[in-house]
Image (tube, grey):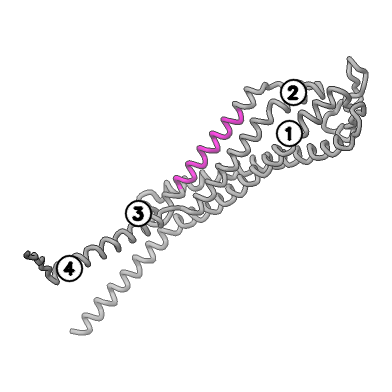
Amino acid sequence: MTYSRKSYSYSSISRDKKCSSCTAIGCRRSCLRCLSRVPFATLVATVMCCAGVAVFLGAVLRQVDSTLRMLEVVFERRSPYGPSELRAAALVAAALMGLLELCLLLVGCLTTGPTRERLGNRARVGGRLSCALLLALSYMAFLAWVALALFMALAALLCSLAGALCNQLRHEQQCLDLRLFDFLVGQESTPLQHTGRPLLELCGARRKEFCKDWVEPSGLLLWLAAAAALLVLLGLVQHLMCLAANYAHLRDQQKLLDLQLLQDLQDTEMTTLGSKDRF
């Protein structure tokens, strides 16, 4: 029985090790280069805003039908807009917010790390205009979400107070007196046509519609919508900070390039003078 021995040269082994190590180093450098192009702050803000908008939209869509029915049955007020119109408006607003987030993420990618350095000389003016425009749009969206957050927080607080009043009633025959909230309705002295009772005195079916069918399921949804609006506000604040920083980087990049050019010219002149003195 014969054994075949395969010979290896030291040069081939060293070459294989060198190639594998170079490949690992190149892959590591490529990964680091890709990670340096990712705008992590803008990405986190985008995730916060998208999650907040999704939760807010879900809470609002589930709340539309019961709120309109409660206003019509309990307070005899019919909304000029139906559930379909309100849902369409909420979906359009969410779509516009999603489009704004997409633009913010795109501009964040283009103004981060090596991408900004590569595109800075060719698209510096366009980048500054894009950052300024998105700053204005983000600020307007921030003001709109501040109003929504305050409205939802106030609605959730009033719903909690109404729930506490409902829990104080021990018997089904007792009526719920909501004259504490007459500043919201404005029709406290107007009696109902079919019962003759005041509008803000809820008895029987009107009390059940308000306490059981609206207050109990609506409290959690309203607080959830307020928390989602607060999350969107935090994301927009982070977007505003990122846009301001990117705008400052783009504005100061030309100054840094000019300073670097002057430094290179001075180094070249000093090198030339040194070579002349040598001869």
Number of other residues with Cα within 10 Å of mark 3, as a class: few under 14, some 14 to 19, many 20 or more: few
In the structure shown, which secondary structural element does the residue marked by tag 2 occupy?
Answer: helix
In the structure shown, which secondary structural element does the residue marked by tag 4 occupy?
Answer: helix
Residue topped by disc 4: 13
Above or below, 69 against 147 in this view is above
Q: Do callouts 2 and 4 mark residues in contact (Cβ within 8 Å)?
A: no
Residue 105 colored in magenta in the image: yes
- Residue at x 89%, y 35% (from the top left corner): 180
Q: Toward the viewer: 241 or 52?
A: 52
Please tell me the numbered disc located at residue 104.
none
- Residue at x 92%, y 29% (from the top left corner): 174
For badge 4, the amino acid type reads: Ile
Lower position in the chain sequence, tag 3 or tag 2? 2
Q: Would you say 212 lies left or right of 232 here?
A: right
Q: Do callouts 3 and 2 mark residues in contact (Cβ within 8 Å)?
A: no
Residue 46 colored in magenta in the image: no
- Residue at x 53%, y 46% (from the top left corner): 47
Residue topped by disc 3: 118
For badge 2, the amino acid type reads: Arg
Q: Nearer the viewer, mark 2 or mark 4?
A: 4
